[in-house]
Image (cartoon, rainbow, N blue to C red):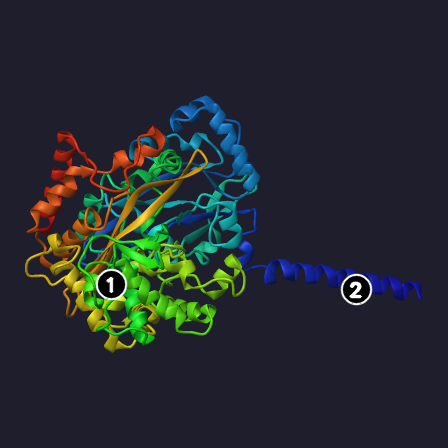
């Protein structure tokens, strides 16, 4: 029995050894476990990111060579830290801090020790790298922006953090990733695929050559080039017009949903977020909590839409059959309930029908229409839900589904909203009459309002706004090529569009007409409040303008928001007319509008909450005029844009 037990023990031990050897030599001899083998060094070969072009083929984003000093902490041997720090242009404290961070990440995996060496620093350091065991230089591509515009559109790239590394195993410490704009939205397309080389090391930790003659090595795959929908010239022009102002411009091609321009002001040169100065410059932008240059107002800012919202109420009134184009309403400088005025209005002729109501932007007319919509139903709750559903069908009150990573949904109230506010069945249409004129509880982002106008220009449908035009000739997502229908019948759009056309011909934008272009537009003025020392204070009104052109077969639809811009036609209307003429004609004939916009600034308005200077909400005020140096700078930029176009 003992002999049998001894024999079985020998057999079991032998089989165990054979199984273990098989596991180590056969089963684990695959590329996956190469990543965990300490006797093999992994050297990544980073691909070039894809280029970015505008809709006309202009190169916007390319690459430039960059050199990173890498470290494998466990392989570092004693070195002259003072000499090494001098070569890297860092101090010893930075050296120790960075080394400890890399060691905590992984003592055996490579990490970026110093990034973005200049060509000159690389040339000096390369000759001496043999003295510093555990350190080596890795070449990769860094972004080079061929333009100074479109920072919010193009975005930037920066180092991944631990959360990204844990979420996506593709990335390792020190890798770069798109942080904003198209760099972030199309990261997987632009980044390409990293290559890798496996280097065999001997027992002294010295490189002895490719592992198994390089059969497991891979070569990098360059990222794909993309073409975006932005017109670079129009973008540059829009950003020029918005200098010394705050707000946003979104222009869309109605027939496709392609975003032609996406301006957020104030902006910055995207090149300042490249290289070793990226962190310092980003911190400066981030800490500017007053102007907020990193806040994309075109996608994220939520404003009361003001009077442009009236055209939507006109369409809903026609669809709900509570008003006709022949119905006329009187206006006594506002809308009254008994002897109480619920909303004021400016002076114009009275009574008014629908087209004149739009052209003259009559608050009383649209208050009557709004009440008829809500009061059509037995309960205001049901009327509010019907109204809300119509509004939301134009893309308001929710994320539009565009291909950019940021945005806000705005706010379109419904019956539940007011039940929570006032109590169930304890409110009526007069409680929220401000919704009739785009004030009250209604809020929208510039891109939502531009999309709404594109839907009106198309007589009842829209394409989801998007920034991508093509990817190396690939077909774009069908979500962007499938029309979305609104709840309004096509037959109801013509009288509303006629009213918007009359805005330019005999209404509130009559001074903004452009020769040979039939523009349909709507001015808007939105009240603006801010808490100052804990007190709700009314600031200067926002200037809003929406438009599309031409009237038939429209090529462009846009929304312009200018914060603290007084009223619709003063700043936003002038800018809208110029953007439309620039896109359709290429040249500007309304030089008077252009000169006025370049010469006038709103910086003094933005300073008032901090200086204590009083606001004048109503009536004429003196607008700040830029000094001669600033004006000459803007004219120089304008000449550069015009020369580039020619």
Q: As rendered, which of 387 and 329 lies closer to the eye? A: 329
Query: Compared to 499, does 168 lie above or below?
Result: above
Q: Residue 124's image quarter?
A: top left
**Residue at 25%, 44% in the rendered image:** 565
User: Circle 1 sits on which residue?
Assistant: 330
**Residue at 44%, 51% in the rendered image:** 197
* Secondary structure of residue under mark 2: helix
Image side of residue 91 versus residue 514, left or right: right
Question: Can residue 172 be seen at all in this image of the molecule?
Answer: yes
Q: Residue 328's image quarter?
A: bottom left
Q: Quadrant of the N terminus?
A: bottom right
User: Circle 2 sits on which residue?
Assistant: 11
* Secondary structure of residue under mark 1: loop
- Image position, residue 358 (x, y; %): 22, 62
Image side of residue 581 versus residue 313, left or right: left
Residue contact between numbered discs 1 and 2, judged by CB atoms under 8 Å: no
Q: As rendered, which of 96 and 273 lies closer to the eye? A: 273
- Image position, residue 443 (x, y; %): 37, 55
Image side of residue 646 versus residue 555, left or right: left
Q: Please tell me how crowded label 1 is: few (under 14), some (14-19), or many (20+) other residues with Cα within 10 Å.
A: some
Query: Compared to 403, does 612 lie above or below?
Result: above
């Amino acid at each position: 029995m003992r002999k049998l037990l001894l024999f079985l023990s020998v057999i079991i031990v032998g089989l165990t050894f054979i199984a273990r050897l098989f596991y180590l030599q056969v089963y684990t001899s695959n590329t996956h476990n190469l990543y965990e083998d300490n006797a093999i060094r992994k050297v990544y070969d980073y691909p070039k990111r894809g280029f970015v072009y505008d809709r006309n083929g202009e190169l916007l984003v390319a690459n430039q060579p960059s050199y990173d000093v890498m470290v494998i902490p466990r392989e570092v041997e004693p070195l002259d830290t003072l000499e090494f720090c001098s070569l890297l242009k860092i101090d010893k404290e930075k050296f120790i801090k960075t080394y400890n961070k890399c060691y905590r990440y992984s003592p055996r995996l490579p990490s970026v020790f110093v990034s973005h060496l200049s060509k000159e620093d690389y040339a000096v350091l390369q000759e001496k790298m043999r003295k510093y065991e555990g350190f080596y230089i890795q070449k990769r591509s860094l972004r080079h922006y061929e333009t100074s515009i479109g920072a919010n559109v193009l975005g930037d790239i920066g180092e991944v953090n631990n959360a990204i590394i844990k979420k996506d195993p593709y990335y390792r410490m020190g890798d770069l990733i798109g942080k904003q704009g198209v760099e972030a939205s199309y990261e997987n397309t632009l980044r390409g695929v990293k290559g890798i080389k496996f280097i065999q090391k001997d027992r002294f930790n010295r490189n002895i050559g490719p592992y198994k003659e390089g059969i497991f090595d891979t070569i990098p795959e360059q990222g794909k080039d993309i073409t975006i929908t932005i017109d670079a010239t129009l973008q540059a022009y829009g950003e020029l017009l918005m200098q010394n102002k705050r707000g946003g411009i979104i222009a869309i091609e109605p027939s496709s949903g392609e975003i032609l321009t996406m301006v957020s002001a104030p902006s910055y040169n995207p090149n300042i977020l490249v290289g070793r100065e990226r962190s310092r410059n980003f911190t400066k932008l981030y800490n500017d909590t007053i102007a907020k240059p990193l806040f994309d107002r075109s996608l994220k800012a939520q404003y009361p839409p003001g009077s442009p919202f009236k055209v939507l109420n006109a369409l809903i009134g026609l669809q709900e059959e509570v008003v006709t184009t022949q119905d006329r309403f009187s206006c006594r400088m506002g809308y009254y309930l008994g002897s109480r005025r619920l909303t004021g209005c400016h002076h114009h002729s009275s009574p008014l029908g629908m087209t004149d109501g739009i052209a003259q932007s009559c608050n009383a007319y649209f208050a009557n229409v709004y009440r008829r919509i809500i009061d059509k139903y037995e309960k205001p709750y049901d009327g509010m839900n019907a109204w809300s559903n119509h509004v939301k069908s134009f893309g308001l009150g929710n994320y539009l589904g565009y291909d950019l990573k940021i945005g806000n949904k705005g706010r379109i109230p419904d019956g539940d909203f007011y039940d929570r506010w006032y109590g169930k069945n304890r409110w009526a249409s007069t409680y929220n009459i401000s919704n009739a004129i785009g004030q009250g509880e209604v809020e929208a982002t510039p891109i939502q309002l531009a999309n709404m106008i594109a839907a009106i220009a198309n007589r009842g449908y829209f394409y989801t706004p998007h920034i991508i035009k093509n990817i190396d000739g690939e077909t774009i997502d069908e979500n962007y090529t499938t029309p979305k229908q609104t709840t309004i019948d096509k037959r109801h759009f013509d009288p509303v569009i006629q009213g918007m056309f009359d805005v330019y011909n005999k209404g509130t934008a009559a001074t903004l007409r452009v020769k040979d272009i039939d523009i349909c537009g709507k001015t808007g003025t939105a009240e603006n409040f801010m808490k100052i020392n804990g007190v709700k204070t009314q600031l200067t009104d926002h200037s809003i303008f929406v438009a599309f052109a031409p009237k038939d077969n429209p090529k462009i639809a846009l929304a312009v928001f200018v914060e603290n811009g007084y009223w619709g036609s003063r700043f936003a209307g002038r800018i809208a007319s110029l953007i439309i003429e620039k896109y359709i004609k290429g040249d500007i004939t309304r030089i008077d509008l252009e000169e006025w916009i370049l010469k006038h600034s709103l910086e003094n308005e933005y300073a008032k909450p901090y200086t204590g200077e009083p606001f004048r909400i109503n009536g004429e005020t003196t607008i700040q005029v830029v000094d001669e140096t600033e004006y000459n700078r803007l004219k120089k930029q304008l000449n550069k844009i015009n020369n580039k176009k020619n």
